[in-house]
Image (cartoon, grey):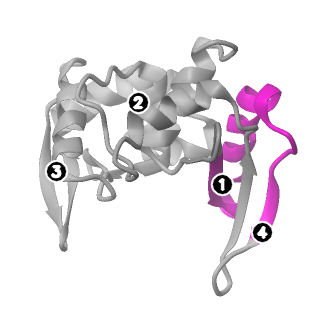
Amino acid sequence: MGSLSKVQQQLILGSVLGDGYLRKKVNAHLQITHSAKQKSYVDWKYNILKNIVITPPKFYKGNGSRVGYRFFTKSIPELTDFYDKFYQSGRKAVPKNLILSPLSLAVWYMDDGSKSRRSGYLNCQQFDLASQNNLVNSLKRFGIKGSLNKDKIYTRIYISTEGMTKLVKLIKEFIVPSMRYKLLI
């Protein structure tokens, strides 16, 4: 991935699976947007990616009373590689041969994960069924059994108590302090 460090690559991968959004004209750029309440999390991502960011994160007013906090990276060929893997048909989809690392899994969980008593969920409702199955298979590589679970009209990944114990052990060291409420601690 050229000028991107391994840590940057894994953070980007986890973000693309979660709340990150890639856009492309000639080269792609990444948009990182979260609620203003997650400022410290956005700042953590920014500090890892700052050499490919033009301006630091800023607050913005969203719909209604929503206040967000976001930044955009530069448009660079390395992000275009991510775009080409995840947006082959113009819509975000998960490649079949996806290989996650503990860091990319931690970022995805911080973006879109939640606990429910001792079990948990990875929200992946924006992905089609094939992509969701690719994500379930990616979790199996870590010995984490996930299953698709209906949430109203959408599907998300359910992780059992045993799976959550494995997941937490795997990602705990990467979870930023403000996001530790998502763990089973």
Q: Are marks 3 and 2 in contact (CB under 8 Å)?
A: no
Badge 4, how many Cα within 10 Å: few under 14, some, many 20+? Answer: few
Q: Residue at x 21, y 18 (%)?
A: 141
Q: Residue at x 66, y 44 (%)?
A: 41
The amino acid beneath tag 4 is Tyr
Residue where numbered disc 1 is placed? 38
The residue closer to the viewer here, 48 or 84, is 84
Tell me where residue 173 appears, x and y as whole percent.
Answer: 52, 22
Q: Nearer the viewer, mark 1 or mark 2?
A: 2
Marks 3 and 2, how far apart in space? 19 Å
Residue where numbered disc 4 is placed? 60
Q: Earlier in the sequence, mark 3 or mark 1?
A: 1
Q: Which residues are magenta?
A: 31-60
Marks 1 and 2, how far apart in space? 18 Å
In the depicted structure, whether residue 155 falls above or below residue 144: below
Q: Earlier in the sequence, mark 2 or mark 4?
A: 4
Q: Quadrant of the N terminus?
A: top right
Residue where numbered disc 2 is placed? 105
The answer to whether any part of residue 101 appears in the image is yes
Q: Nearer the viewer, mark 3 or mark 1?
A: 3
Q: Are marks 3 and 1 in contact (CB under 8 Å)?
A: no
Marks 3 and 1, how far apart in space? 29 Å
Q: Earlier in the sequence, mark 1 or mark 4?
A: 1
Is residue 23 highlighted in magenta? Answer: no
Count the marks.
4
